[in-house]
Image (cartoon, rainbow, N blue to C red):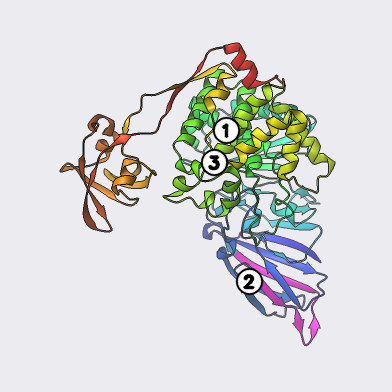
């Protein structure tokens, strides 16, 4: 079965993409067409079929064929007319694209960003090469993608992919965006930038190149012929998604000139770029080949995202974008966030990974009370694992290179947990492997203080403050409870998510009052709150309690030891 596609956007202001599929060599009476329900790297059923406006199918003579939708994402085509199977059919559909995230598509007058899983249907059972023709809107001048360009004329935009998986794993930017690039190791690295970029263009390019060079040297080789960094800049935008030989990055336009926020941008670049090895190639066995209509459950996101979340910050430290003190500040923030989440007591890294489809990507008001992010805890587990490795005079770099060698032995087969634990045993010993496995499988708190002492760093805690134990959001000056932390005063005395705090001891309670609570509250004192709950005025009495124990600073006792052990041997 051969499938080729034609994409056109005649009216981008409508946010619709028009897709035509030309399908040949059909041999069955019924042909099932589907559109993915989720995107690799973003583990939530996003139900892209909801955006399909219509599906029209006809044979090569223009005769219409009957189409019946048989599930939320699948359409069944009856290919017969007069008991004769039509082995060549034309499928036409329109799909609405008006959500600018890394896992959805966005079309308006300024550009078209095509995220493959959210746009392109396929036929069940189809295999082989894919050809795509893009009909260029006259208002636009560029197409940027790592799909193979097979155009024979300048005015024709024709591309090819080896198969459907590669096809939809290759984002496309169409419009009048800025493009640039650099060479490294004889291979082109393209930069495409859409939106209101307010940073330093020269530094932007130089720093991405530095990250590429550093990470490539760390792993040891480049598994691609060319690579694309596709960046979208708009206020309050944030996100990143890895692809086989490209990444899509989204960041707040206004944050590119603030030092700390710019370091956050570099972390994002390093995170998604490292994914081209870890996830797109080194991966759990469950993550490829994909069933795009059903969930892909794995207990190993502590490897896919935990390792990557640790390495992104380590990379910018090792590449000299930040100092030891700034690196430890990032680790301090990570540990404090971990300590603020009661769900760490109930959900192991394995459980968090398996439940990502219903928890992490669908976090609600009670999420932090029941679960822990495998990004956050996974990154911290690899932070202490890197310290564990120093006892054997090696660092996380050796571990990554061994992982890469393990992958290359059979690229078609993913890893199982035991493969990783056995690799750790090979590099260190059985005790180290079992200690790491315990961190992955248990819900016991991590003894950060003991690990940090081994690298010449001491934890200095803040004095515990009085706390009510709820997070809020504001509507103008009004204060609404967003979530309540388990075992806090608010949890004990009945404050609920969704409550509007109306008054405190008879005084109207507004935004400034919440932000000054630490100056208002006294120990062993009962306060009278009135909240609006479901439209009813509800009185509550609350006695504040000691809040979460927080780290004030990670104090370096031995700079040389800390720098050497945490950073590892410079690549």
Q: Are marks 1 and 2 in contact (CB under 8 Å)?
A: no
Quarter of the image containing the N terminus?
A: bottom right
Separation of disc 1 and disc 2 at Cα? Answer: 47 Å
Residue 87 belongs to the span the image colors magenta: yes
Mark carried by residue 55: 2
Kindly indicate the quadrant of the structure image that contains residue 268. top right
Magenta-highlighted residues: 75-94
Name the residue carrying label 1. Answer: 380
In terms of depth relative to the viewer, which is nearer, 103 or 461?
Answer: 461
Residue for point 59% across, 71% down: 54
Mark 2 or 3, closer to the camera: 3
The relative height of residue 263 versus residue 277 in the rendered view (above or below) is above
Q: Position of residue 17 (x, y in %)?
A: 60, 60
Gap in angstroms between the C-alphas marked 2 and 3: 49 Å
Answer few, some or many: residues within 10 Å of disc 1's Cα (few below 14, many 20 plus, some between 14 and 19).
many
Q: Whole-percent x and y of residue 81?
A: 76, 84
| Residue 369 in view (yes/no) | yes
- Say which residue label 3 marks: 443
């Amino acid at each position: 079965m051969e499938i080729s596609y034609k994409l056109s956007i005649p009216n981008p202001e409508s946010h619709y993409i028009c897709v035509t599929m030309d399908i040949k060599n059909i041999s069955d009476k019924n042909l099932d067409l589907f559109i993915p329900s989720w995107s690799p790297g973003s583990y939530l059923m996003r139900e892209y079929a909801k955006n399909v406006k219509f599906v029209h199918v006809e044979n090569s003579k223009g005769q219409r064929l009957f189409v019946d939708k048989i599930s939320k994402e699948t359409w069944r085509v009856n290919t017969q007319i007069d008991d004769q199977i039509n082995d060549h059919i034309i499928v036409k559909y329109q799909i609405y694209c008006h959500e600018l995230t890394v896992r959805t598509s966005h079309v308006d007058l300024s550009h078209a960003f095509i995220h493959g899983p959210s746009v392109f249907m396929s036929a069940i059972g189809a295999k082989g090469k894919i050809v795509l023709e893009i009909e260029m809107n006259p208002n636009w001048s560029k197409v940027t993608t790592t799909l193979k360009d097979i155009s024979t004329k300048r005015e024709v935009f024709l591309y090819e992919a080896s198969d459907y998986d590669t096809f939809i794993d290759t984002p496309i930017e169409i419009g009048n965006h800025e493009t640039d690039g650099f060479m490294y190791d004889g291979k082109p690295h393209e930069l495409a930038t859409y939106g209101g970029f307010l940073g330093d263009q020269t530094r932007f390019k130089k720093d991405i190149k530095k990250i590429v060079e550093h990470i490539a040297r760390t792993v040891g080789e480049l598994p691609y012929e060319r690579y694309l960094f596709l960046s979208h800049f708009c206020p309050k935008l944030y996100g990143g998604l890895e692809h086989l030989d490209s990444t899509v990055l989204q960041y707040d336009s206004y944050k590119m000139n603030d030092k700390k926020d710019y370091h956050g941008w570099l972390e994002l670049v390093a995170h998604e770029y490292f994914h081209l090895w870890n996830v797109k190639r080194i991966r759990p066995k469950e993550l490829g080949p994909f069933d795009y209509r059903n969930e892909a459950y794995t207990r190993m996101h502590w490897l896919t995202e935990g390792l990557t979340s640790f390495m992104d910050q380590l990379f910018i430290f090792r590449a000299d974008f930040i100092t030891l003190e700034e690196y430890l500040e990032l680790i301090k923030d990570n540990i404090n966030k971990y300590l603020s989440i009661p769900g760490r007591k109930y959900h192991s890294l394995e459980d968090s990974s398996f439940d990502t489809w219903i928890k992490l990507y669908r976090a609600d008001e009670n999420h932090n009370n029941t679960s822990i992010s495998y990004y956050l805890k996974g990154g911290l587990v690899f932070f202490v694992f890197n310290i564990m490795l120093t006892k054997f005079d090696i660092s996380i770099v050796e571990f990554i290179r061994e992982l890469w060698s393990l992958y290359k032995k059979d690229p078609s087969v993913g890893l199982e947990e035991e493969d990783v634990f056995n690799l750790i045993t090979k590099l260190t010993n059985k005790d180290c492997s079992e200690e790491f496995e315990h961190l992955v499988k248990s819900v016991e708190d991590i003894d950060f203080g003991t690990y940090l002492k081994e690298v010449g760093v001491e934890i200095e805690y803040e004095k515990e403050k009085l706390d009510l134990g709820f997070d809020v959001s504001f509507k103008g000056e009004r204060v609404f409870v967003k979530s309540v932390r388990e075992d806090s005063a608010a949890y004990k005395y009945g404050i609920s998510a969704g409550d509007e705090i109306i008054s405190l001891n008879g005084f109207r309670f507004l935004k400034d009052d919440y932000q000054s609570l630490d100056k208002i509250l006294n120990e062993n004192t009962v306060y009278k709150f009135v909240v609006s709950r479901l439209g009813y005025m509800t009185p509550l009495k609350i006695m504040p309690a000691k809040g979460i124990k927080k780290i004030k600073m990670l104090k370096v006792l031995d700079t040389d030891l800390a720098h050497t052990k945490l950073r590892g041997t410079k690549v």
